[in-house]
Amino acid sequence: VKGVDGSYTSPDLIKIFGSGAVGALAYAFTDTFWFSAVESEVYAMSSLCTAVVFWGILKWENHADEAGADRWLIFIAYVMGLSIGVHLLNLLVIPAIALVIYFKRSKTVTSSGATKAFLIGVIVLALILWGIIQYTVKAAAYFDLFFVNSLGMGFGTGFNLFFILVIALFVYAVWYSIKKAKPMLNLILISTAFIIFGYSSFAMIMVRAKANPTLNNSDPDNAFSFVSYLGREQYASEPLLNGPTFDAQVEDAVPTYTYRKDKDKYTKVENGMDYKYNKTMFFPRVYSSRDQGHIDYYRDYLKIPEGQSPTFGDNLKFFFSYQIGHMYGRYFLWNFAGRQNDQQGQGSFTEGNWISGVKPVDQMHVGGQNAIPDSLKTDPSNNKYYFLPLIIGLIGAFWHFGKRQRDAGIVGLLFFFTGLAIVLYLNQSPLQPRERDYAYAGSFYAFAIWIGLGVFAIADYLSKKVDGKMAVGIATAACLLGAPVLLGFQNWDDHDRSQKTTARDLAKNYLASCAPNAILFTYGDNDTYPLWYVQEVENYRPDVRVVNLSLLSSDWYMRQMKQKVNQADGLPINIDDEKFKKGVREVLYYQDMKVPGHVDLDLVMQILLSDDQKNKLELRGGKFENFLPTKNFSLPVNREAVLQNNVVPKAWQESIVDTMSWTYNRNYVSRAELSILNVLLNNNWKRPIYFAATVPNDNYLGLDKYLVQEGFALRLMPIATPEGSEGTLVDTQSAFKDITTKYQWGNMANASYLDPESYRMITMITNTVMGGTATQLMMEGHKDEARKVAVETFEKMPKRVYLMRDILGYIPIINVLYETGENKRANEIVNRNLKFIDDNIKWYQNISETKPELEYDNIKMAIQAIESYHKIFSTVRNPDNDLVNRINATRKLLQETYLSESN
């Protein structure tokens, strides 16, 4: 671009700055990056680190022949070290950096030389990823093991001494490189040292853990727990080069080991199993058997009959079609072609697909373009870019390869390593719990560079037709409009978080449902982290002890639960730490000992916690382990304590049982179940015990009949379920008070956009929380209170339908509104729900004309809803006749289309 004298002309400057603006803004407004930028996650900061590092190597290249230019390489090394504490994705830039250095430093560039530089980059990446990040700390841990166990010194002595020796070794090596005038060695040593300096920010994790703060996940306060924390050992690892197929059977299991910190030494304990399988495959892609759903998905997706094993061809088909196509290509096109909606895509034609806005293309890809429902047309997450950003990027890439093949190769390598290379490494199984596009943000960043270079490509072409300045102006304006402006306009409405308070408000509602000093069991991320936030940051209901059941199986979390946090006392767990430390009572299995009747929970706990060998089973290898001898438990109820602590409403106090009896619903006892059972045994009704409404039923441990709905939580009560009652009991007075005076709904009703995690809550709120309360109030004769709950639901819940299941969720509220004379409000809900059903059924039918699969689940829910509406309207006084006719017409259509014998 520079002239002969090193200066820039005005058109050149416009091209340079225009190209930079187009590329940077295009990436800023892409779906994936924008979503990452407005959530409390690491991926936006990771993108920044990637950009800074890549910018740094380009600065080095520009000044490489000047004195002191290698300081840029040291800067890059330091940022990379720091970025390890953000996310490892930043390290994938290293192979591209290696090529930049090779092209700049090599006098003669050859294919073999470039290949060697690339391989050196990969080796450096591996050395950092495993050598520095993993094995440096592992070596320090084993150093500490020697000093503690062999020399009797304190914990951390060897760990600290190891790094003192490392520092001393680096100091000597740097001094040696200077003395012997070895500049390359000096640069390598100082760069490595700065990577370690940046990486040393992780020391904060150990320092923080030593302080034992309120939130202290994994408690990495010693060398070996820190190694476990760094290795993310709580997550399953996926096979890469060799592994089982999904139908493989385990032939043998070899235990793996780690070390546990005890009072004055480290103790070797089992840390899992290394399984040997009867069927393995090279480059395994269809390996997951941890969930029956995965096995069913493989067979359905690849059309593998039951009883038949997958072939290597099936393996490759899944790799190219699902892992590359569905789990990368789909995300790539979300960002540069368009996105159907923000529902999670698991392979259907109506959820989470890429689209373009070009009707023939979309018809061929997902079908149904002749009957798109209004709910999709007005969906803020329905974004169409008409392939324009993609086309501009491809033009820029072709131009780049044509003009500067080396530079284009570097960007291409960055694109590959932050995209397809991650696909290879992650080896994702089907039915992921959430979309994973954030993992490939670096790849989209690389493509955005080519979008920026599209300005140069188009300007070069136009300069042959028109004046240079005009060509540059037209190219810059066209690319700005075709990429960042289009992306910004399309994505604004579903990425604007300025009025989003749903997560905070619902978190407060969970806590508001609990009586003072309560224990609240939660399950997942989304019903736990917001609760931690409002307690720790907003100081809202710090008296409630939030207990995450997914973490409670860990020894460190169980220890933390015994401690007081803020105003919340620890759980009443009286199990000695020695009885559940790492490697002890990890999982205790059920062995039916034919014990008659129900056994007192106290006796069951004694057997589970006994150290007497006669109360244990001998396992393979001669090891003795505790076991669960019966699933039938009983717990005597202290009636006086129940009454004194207001556990049961006055209306139900006659129903208090003398003994709670139930059947445990699992074949094992982990620390989580052990903790819950111990809390039941020791609490003596002093503290209210709740399960969040989002906790899966099997986590109730069989206590379902003793759980009573109180808004967003279910409270444990020792009462006999009244005769003839169906479903979960509702403490209507408590729930009514919470709903009308405590709950916060933010802007759910009027929000232009609700993110998927928020709108998935609507059915639970309308059906379980509000609908269950209103229905029970009607049954108890509290008609006006029931009406107020139903009206509150009408006013506070969204006025748009997001999912077919929302229509089912509204049925109890619709019923109560009609029964309490609120026909106008009920009609409004039914009208919008009917429109959603009618529009979407037409859409499904239109899709089925060109695509092989029907939306069976959604159709079943539509039929169920229509049948419920038909039943409701048979008892409605003064019904809207037009509405009745519409219901009957839709019912007839559904019956004839899907329920007749011919169909």
Image (tube, rainbow, N blue to C red):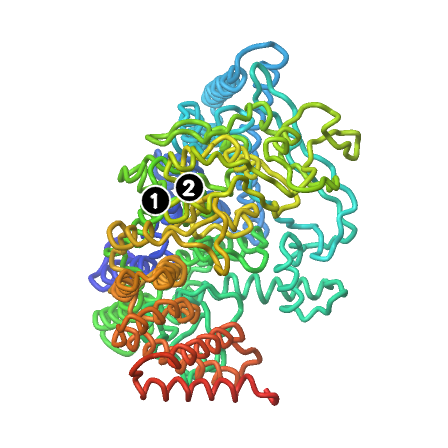
Q: Position of residue 97 (x, y in %)?
A: 46, 46
> Disc 2 vs disc 1: Cβ atoms closer than 8 Å?
yes
Q: Residue at x 73, y 30 (%)?
A: 616
Establish if 702 lies above or below 618.
below
Q: Residues within 10 Å of mark 1 (few under 14, many from 20)?
A: many
Image coords of residue 531 (percent x, y): 36, 43
Q: Is residue 467 left or right of residue 808?
A: left
The answer to whether any part of residue 93 appears in the image is: no
Locate the C terminus and report the quarter of the image it occupies: bottom right
Q: Secondary structure at mark 1?
A: helix
- In the displayed structure, would residue 594 be above or below residue 192? below
Residue pictured at 28% horizontal, 65% vertical: 787
Residue sitting at 40 percent across and 68 percent down? 806
Question: How would you rate the neighbour count of disc 2 (Cα within 10 Å): few for under 14, some for 14-19, many for 20 or more?
Answer: many
Which type of secondary structure does the marked residue at label 2 adopt? strand
> Which residue was labeled with disc 1?
511
Instruction: Work out whether residue 626 or residue 147 is closer to the camera in this orientation and state it.
Output: 626
Along the viewing direction, whichever of 438 and 633 lies nearer the viewer: 633
Q: Answer left or right for 550 relative to 686.
A: right
* Residue type of the residue flagged with mark 1: Leu
In which quadrant of the rendered view does residue 592 lie?
top right
Q: Is residue 60 visible?
A: yes
Viewer-proximal residue, 763 or 874? 874
Q: Tell me where residue 440 appears, x and y as whole percent.
A: 46, 55
**Looking at the image, is mark 2 or mark 1 earlier in the sequence?**
1
Residue annotated with mark 2 = 520
Quarter of the figure with the N terminus? bottom left
Q: Amino acid at mark 2?
A: Leu
